Amino acid sequence: MLTPKVRRLVSLLTRLPGVGEKTAQRYVLYLLTTDPDVAKDLGAELATLHDELRPCERCGNLAEVVVGESPVLCTVCRDDKRDPRILCVVGRVHDLMAIERTGAMRGRYFVLGRLLSPLEGIGPEDLPIPRLLGRIREEGVTEVIVATPPSVDGEATALFLKRELAGTGVAMTRIASGVPHGGDLEYADPITMGRALAGRQTL
């Protein structure tokens, strides 16, 4: 019952993560029945997405391109109030955004872009370690916070970073993991509960 145009749009939308065929159909039907300016504005923004947004040349975060300005830097790297001696290493931009939402990070970031994953063919040579080492030297970093996720790939990446940065002299810390705020202990898996106990603090 779908027209060729709608089928093409649904096919494109289902390429987005977490968007199935039914959700894509709802999006298309909504855009068809709402104010036409919504679809036009969305299309205009998507058309210029890659022209106006680039990875930050210093940390890898999303940065808006400003005509005539070079290098392309994100808002975090432009913030002079940030402590350049503290560098938080994350796997993806999503992780950086999650940490920023807490308002607790006063340093700067370095986005690896990926995690070690033998199953996906991602090895040590695929991580931007030389750039990370360069930032540590150039910016006088004294602490590296490893904020990779508590998954198999995240833990493997954290151990690899520990080995690679061992000769830099910087203090290396790892984000804590354990029982989530508001969670019930009976639903915590053994690994999470073990980490919560290992990371216990003095009251």
Image: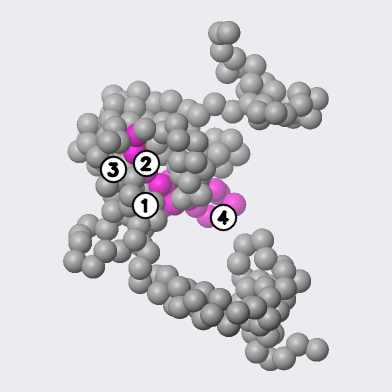
- Above or below — where is 33 with respect to 171? below
Nearer to the camera, 167 or 52 = 52
The answer to which of marks 4 and 2 sits earlier in the sequence is 2
Image mark for residue 70: none
Residue on which the image places disc 3:
79
> What is the span of residues highlighted in magenta in the rendered image?
107-126
Looking at the rendered structure, the secondary structure element under dot 4 is helix
The answer to which of marks 2 and 1 sits earlier in the sequence is 1
- Above or below — where is 5 with respect to 96? below
Between the C-alphas of marks 4 and 2, the distance is 25 Å
Q: Is residue 112 left or right of residue 72?
A: right
Could you classify mark 3 by the number of other residues whose Cα lies within 10 Å: few (under 14), some (14-19), or many (20 or more)? few
Which quadrant of the figure contains the C terminus? top right
Between the C-alphas of marks 2 and 3, the distance is 12 Å
Looking at the rendered structure, the secondary structure element under dot 1 is loop
Q: Position of residue 134 (x, y in %)?
A: 25, 42
Which quadrant of the figure contains the N terminus? bottom right
Looking at the rendered structure, the secondary structure element under dot 2 is strand
Nearer to the camera, 118 or 34 = 34
Q: Position of residue 164 (x, y in %)?
A: 36, 34
Between the C-alphas of marks 1 and 4, the distance is 21 Å
Residue lying furthest front: 35
Q: Are marks 1 and 3 in contact (CB under 8 Å)?
A: no
Residue on which the image places disc 4:
120
Q: Nearer the viewer, mark 4 or mark 3?
A: 3
Residue on which the image places disc 1:
60
Q: What's the amino acid at mark 1?
A: Gly
